Image (tube, rainbow, N blue to C red):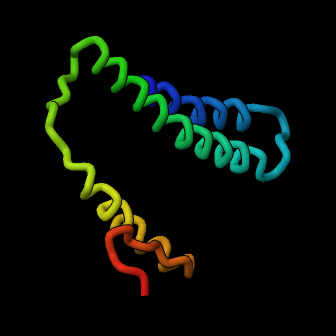
Amino acid sequence: MATAALQRKPRTLDRRIRAAVNPPPGLAERALDIADRQVKLLSRPVDDLMEVSGIARGRIALPKETVGLDRRPHEASVRVEPQSRRAHAPAADPFEPSP
């Protein structure tokens, strides 16, 4: 898949830097760290696009279901509540009465 190709790039970069004559100390490690971060950042959108492409071409079927929108705000507030508590910014549940 496309992400496998992205993941090979840092290893290629590492080999090329290490093969260079007298590379500065730590250059390979810093370059590899940067490349790894970039691969991680790019892999998710690439995977998402591949999935969307599969859906558009009919290779992946999405089941259709009726979803009540009245539950979604509550589910979202429950999902973000741990992060908001850690950030000392409590998330308000839109269906709970304000104090």
| Left/right of residue 31 with respect to residue 6 in the rendered view | right
Quadrant where the image shows the C terminus: bottom left
Q: Residue at x 83, y 34 (%)?
A: 21
Name, please, the residue furthest toward the bottom.
99
Up the image or down, 58 lies above or below 18; here it is above
Name which quarter of the figure residue 32 lies in.
top right
x and y percent of residue 13 in the render? Answer: 66, 32
Nearer-the-camera pick, 54 or 42: 54
x and y percent of residue 28 in the render? Answer: 72, 44
Name, please, the residue furthest toward the top.
57
x and y percent of residue 85 in the render? Answer: 48, 79
Up the image or down, 2 lies above or below 25; here it is above
Quadrant where the image shows the N terminus: top left
Name which quarter of the figure residue 61 lies in.
top left
Up the image or down, 98 lies above or below 10; here it is below
| Left/right of residue 83 with respect to residue 69 in the rendered view | right
Nearer-the-camera pick, 26 or 62: 62
Q: Residue at x 46, y 38 (%)?
A: 44
Up the image or down, 49 lies above or below 84; here it is above
- The answer to whether any part of residue 4 appears in the image is no
Q: Residue at x 56, y 41 (%)?
A: 41
x and y percent of residue 60 in the render? Answer: 21, 22
- The answer to whether any part of residue 13 appears in the image is yes
Name which quarter of the figure residue 35 lies in.
top right
Nearer-the-camera pick, 38 or 47: 47
Disc count in the image? 0
